[in-house]
Image (cartoon, rainbow, N blue to C red):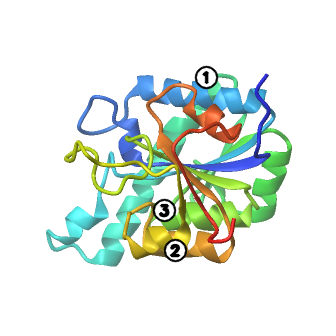
Amino acid sequence: MNTPHYKRVLLKLSGEALLGESSFGIDSKVLDYIAGEIAVLRGLSVETAVVIGGGNIYRGVEMVSRGIDRAAADYMGMLATVMNGIALQNAFERHDIPSRLQSSIEMPRVAEPFIRERALKHLESGRVVIFAGGTGNPYFTTDTAAALRALEIKADVLLKATKVDGVYDKDPVGHSDAVMFDTLTYTEALARDLRVMDAAALSLCRENNLPIVVFNLGKQGNIGGAVCNHKIGTLVRGDTA
């Protein structure tokens, strides 16, 4: 029997994770897969929150290079995360997973506004809380939003889902000799520019001693395994842990 090591977790999903085999949009099979993995956490009585990105629909950085103002591009990206949040919530409900979507940008017809105390009550009641809209401010990534929300809800760990097995010393896609780290400290990750998360998000985690587990979303059971402290992915932790 698996025993959860963490009671409350925040899962960071990139928008690109929803692409599946497509180059744009949302793959319903991926949504169902993620819902199935989240259902495992609920079976373990783990309180779960999710921060979702929007890169499968809109990438603000690319639009800035085409002449769109950075703040405007970031707000457009935040709206894309709300679209993904709606899709994710719909998938959860299809799988009988009670959930709530909260947005940093108020749009009461489709999502609750982000209210910390309300989010905590949802988690304590067994609902999965999906955080969309980033931080609600331009110039901040969804990595930073994930770190911020994890700290606000007092999560025990931040789980960062990726397309690779963990954090490597170089890009494993282009380098067959890339070596994966089992553990890293925040300082090592920042000093070596390993792109675990953006520097602002990683600094937030370091300042508040919030552990990060970076793992491959595509391997079934990885989310549950990471929560049960199995040897999955890369653990990023405090310098003296």
Q: Is residue 37 left or right of residue 139?
A: right
> Which marked residue is nearer to the observer: mark 1 or mark 3?
3
Examine the image and state in which quarter residue 41 appears.
top right
Examine the image and state in which quarter residue 205 appears.
bottom right
| Whole-percent x, y for residue 140 in the image | 45, 72
Counting residues from the start of the chain, the first of labels 1 and 3 encountered is: 1
Q: Which residue is mark 3?
A: 143
Q: Quadrant of the C terminus?
A: bottom right
Q: Quick one: SS at disc 2?
A: helix
Q: Amino acid at mark 2?
A: Thr
| Whole-percent x, y for residue 88 in the image | 53, 37
Q: Is residue 61 left or right of residue 191?
A: left
| Whole-percent x, y for residue 176 in the image | 23, 42
> Which marked residue is nearer to the observer: mark 1 or mark 2?
2
Counting residues from the start of the chain, the first of labels 1 and 2 encountered is: 1
Counting residues from the start of the chain, the first of labels 3 and 2 encountered is: 3
Please name the residue shown 79% across and 32% down the image: 3
Examine the image and state in which quarter residue 100 appears.
top right
Q: Amino acid at mark 1?
A: Arg
Q: Which residue is mark 1?
A: 94
Q: Relative to 20, say whether 188 is above or below.
A: below
Q: Quick one: SS at disc 1?
A: helix
Mark 1–mark 3 Cα distance, whole angstroms, equals 27 Å
| Whole-percent x, y for residue 170 in the image | 29, 56
Please name the residue shown 85% across and 46% down the image: 124
Residue 237 visible in rendering: yes
How crowded pointer 2 is (Cα within 10 Å; few <14, some 14-19, many 20+) is rated as: some
Q: Which residue is mark 2?
A: 187
Mark 1–mark 2 Cα distance, whole angstroms, equals 42 Å
Mark 3–mark 2 Cα distance, whole angstroms, equals 17 Å
Query: In terms of depth relative to the viewer, which is nearer, 33 or 216?
Result: 216
